[in-house]
Image (tube, rainbow, N blue to C red):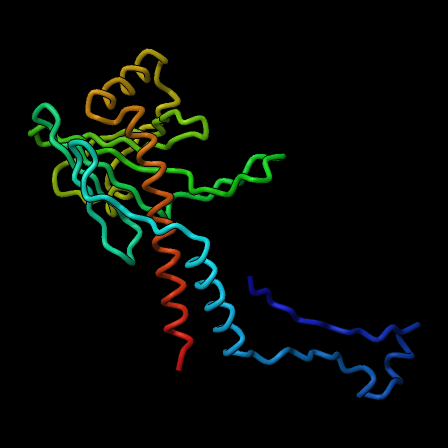
C-alpha cells in the first residue's frame, strides 16, 4: 500500500525572541518530498499481478444456479440473478461496492477478510407493485432482512432510494418477520442460496480486483 509521507522537521527554539532573531534560513521548515517514481509503482503492480497468478485461484462466475439465470459484466460491480417461481419473477440484485470487507476473527490468523454479502430481492407477481427487500447474510450464515418496501413498475434500483419508502423491519413482530423469511425461502432464497451468494460475492470481488490490477498496469505503462 502506498502511503503519503510528508516529513516535516522543526527546529527547536527556546523562546519567541530567539525565533524572531534567527536567520530566515534557520526558521524555514523543511518540506522535502520524495519524488514520484512511476516505474517503481508499476513494478509493484506487476509483482502483485505475478503473485496472484502464482498463488491465486481463478474466479469463475457461472451463468446458471438452479432456476436462476446469472448476468454480470466484467468491470462493473453489479450481478443479477433472475428466476420464475410459481408465476412470480424473482430478481436478486447485488453490488460488490456495497459489500464491505469483514475482518477476520481475532485469534484466527489463517482467516482472511471476506466481503459481507448485501443484496436486494425483488418479487413481481404480475400486479402493478413490486415487492423489494434489502437483505444481508451474517457471518453465521443466516439471512437478515433489513428493510422492505413496494414500488411501481419502472422504478430502477438506482432510483429506489429517492422514490421508494423502505420500512425498517426492526419494528415488525417476530412472527411477521419469520413469515417474510419463509416467503423468501419459497421463492428460492434459501440456505443453499445464502451459501452460493457468499461465494458469488467473493468470486466477483476477486475477479474485479484482478481486472483492477491489469487496468492499473495498463494505465501506468508508456
Picture coordinates of residue 114, whole percent (x, y): 45, 42
The reply, left or right, for residue 75 in relation to residue 43 is left
Quadrant of the rendered image containing residue 37: bottom right
In the depicted structure, whether residue 83 falls above or below residue 182: below
In the depicted structure, whether residue 21 falls above or below residue 109: below
Tell me, yes or no, if residue 191 can be seen here.
yes
In the depicted structure, whether residue 27 falls above or below residue 191: below
The reply, left or right, for residue 134 in relation to residue 170 is left
Residue at image coords 68%, 80%: 32
Tell me, yes or no, if residue 130 can be seen here.
no
Nearest the viewer among 159 and 139 is: 139
Nearest the viewer among 219 and 136 is: 219
Nearest the viewer among 108 and 169 is: 108
Nearest the viewer among 19 and 6 is: 6
Quadrant of the rendered image containing residue 199: top left
Q: For the C terminus, give its image quadrant.
A: bottom left
Picture coordinates of residue 152, whole percent (x, y): 14, 36
Q: For the N terminus, give its image quadrant.
A: bottom right
Residue at image coords 28%, 36%: 120
Picture coordinates of residue 196, whole percent (x, y): 31, 34
Amino acid at each position: 500500500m502506498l502511503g503519503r509521507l510528508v516529513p516535516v522537521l522543526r527546529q527547536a527554539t527556546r523562546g519567541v525572541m530567539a525565533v524572531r532573531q534567527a536567520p530566515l534560513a534557520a526558521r524555514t521548515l523543511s518540506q522535502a518530498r520524495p519524488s514520484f517514481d512511476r516505474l517503481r509503482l508499476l513494478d509493484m503492480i506487476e509483482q502483485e499481478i505475478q503473485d496472484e497468478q502464482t498463488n491465486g485461484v481463478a474466479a469463475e462466475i457461472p451463468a446458471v444456479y438452479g432456476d436462476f439465470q446469472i448476468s454480470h459484466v466484467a468491470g462493473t460491480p453489479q450481478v443479477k440473478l433472475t428466476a420464475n417461481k410459481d408465476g412470480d419473477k424473482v430478481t436478486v440484485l447485488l453490488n460488490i461496492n456495497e459489500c464491505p470487507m469483514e475482518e477476520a476473527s481475532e485469534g484466527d490468523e489463517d482467516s482472511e477478510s471476506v466481503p459481507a454479502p448485501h443484496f436486494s430481492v425483488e418479487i413481481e407477481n404480475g400486479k402493478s407493485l413490486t415487492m423489494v427487500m434489502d437483505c444481508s447474510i451474517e457471518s453465521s450464515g443466516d439471512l437478515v432482512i433489513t428493510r422492505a418496501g413496494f414500488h411501481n413498475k419502472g422504478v430502477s434500483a438506482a432510483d429506489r432510494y429517492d422514490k421508494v419508502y423502505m420500512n425498517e423491519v426492526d419494528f415488525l413482530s417476530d412472527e411477521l418477520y419469520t413469515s417474510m423469511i419463509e416467503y423468501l425461502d419459497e421463492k428460492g432464497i434459501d440456505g443453499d442460496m445464502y451459501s452460493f451468494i457468499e461465494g458469488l460475492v467473493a468470486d466477483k470481488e476477486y475477479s474485479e480486483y484482478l481486472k483492477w490490477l491489469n487496468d492499473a498496469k495498463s494505465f501506468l505503462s508508456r
